[in-house]
Amino acid sequence: MINQTVKASCFQAMHTQNKPFLIPNPWDPGTARLLESLGFEALATTSLGVANMLGVKRATQQALLDNCRSICEATDLPVTIDLENGYADAPNEAAKMIRLACEYGAVGGSIEDWTGVNDPNKPAIYEFNLAVERIHAAAEMAKALPIPFVLTARAEDRLHGHFDLDETIKRLQAYEAVGADVLYMPGIYSLEEMHTVTTALKNPVNVVMGMGDPSITLDQLGNIGVQRVSIGGALSRLALNAFMTGAKQMRAGEFKFVSELISIDEIHSVFA
């Protein structure tokens, strides 16, 4: 296995190359190995994928960390972990997840400004100053680690009913100023909006195409300055859709889906 320091250096270098790179999102060791076999350069965990795997709406902090370790141990690729809001409101407490992510094998991680609360009577997004303090604390923790750890700061406004792009860019610029290595705004759909975001920032931008216009190509993303392209929980949802389609056919007494199965030999050729 490639050691963590080498993985970290490789991952950091990917963010400086003159073309965007794809970073798909596995949810277990098997999907991680399948993605590695296809030639991807790095992987990102997905908290939604972990939750789907466990049959819950939101995975626990420990479940995310354990999932990260299992994926890191299954592949030689660099892995960055989706840490949601760090499972804490206070900046220093949320920042501890960065250290834990490193200890569990990750070479990067994301902290978002969603509060973790799905209650219409409570704020879904942290107040601006607190959100910036949280990213600053996470950046300081990342800098103190023994490897070059890539910190991604996520602005979650669009996912929680806030559609003021200027306000979101203001947040991303503030996160950049306090030490975030990569900026990420899930929920932007059009190439035009993505371009607006990339031109407003100096550091690399991650676009999640699980929420973007599916007609957009990697070449187009590269032309507007996107550095990293992920898919979020989309592959997990795609797999679940195939599962449900097959299960519904079976429940109806039909088995047409059997003609679409991946061969056992193809799977075993990767897992061997």
Image (spheres, rainbow, N blue to C red):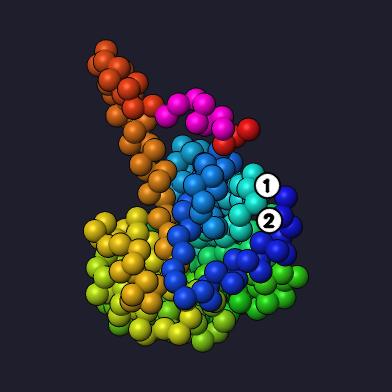
Whether residue 88 sits left or right of residue 231 in the image: it is right
The quadrant where residue 217 appears = bottom left
Q: Let me know if residue 160 appears in the view.
A: no
Q: Residue at x 45, y 49 (%)?
A: 48
Whether residue 243 sits left or right of residue 139 in the image: it is left
Image position, residue 50 (x, y; %): 50, 45
User: Is residue 263 located in the magenta-colored stretch of the structure?
Assistant: yes
Image position, residue 267 (x, y; %): 52, 31
Residue contact at pointers 2 and 1, CB within 8 angstroms: yes
Q: Residue at x 33, y 36 (%)?
A: 241
Q: Pick out the residue farthest to the top.
A: 253
> Around disc 2, counting alpha carbons within 10 Å, would you say few (fewer than 14), some (14 to 19), or many (20 or more)?
many
Q: Does 79 appear above or below 224? A: above
For the residue pair 230 and 129, the one nearer the viewer reads as 230
Q: Secondary structure at mark 1?
A: helix
Q: Residue at x 63, y 48 (%)?
A: 75
Image position, residue 21 (x, y; %): 46, 64
Residue identifier under label 1: 73
Q: Secondary structure at mark 2?
A: loop
Q: Which is the main secondary structure of the residues drawn in magenta?
A: helix
> Around disc 1, counting alpha carbons within 10 Å, would you say few (fewer than 14), some (14 to 19), or many (20 or more)?
some
For the residue pair 2 and 255, the one nearer the viewer reads as 2
Q: Does 35 appear above or below 271? A: below
Residue identifier under label 2: 105
Residue type at mark 1: give it.
Answer: Glu
> Which numbered tag is attached to residue 215?
none
- The image quadrant where one finds the C terminus is top right
Image position, residue 31 (x, y; %): 52, 41
**Magenta region:** 262-269
Measure how far apart labels 2 and 1 are at the Cα level: 8 Å
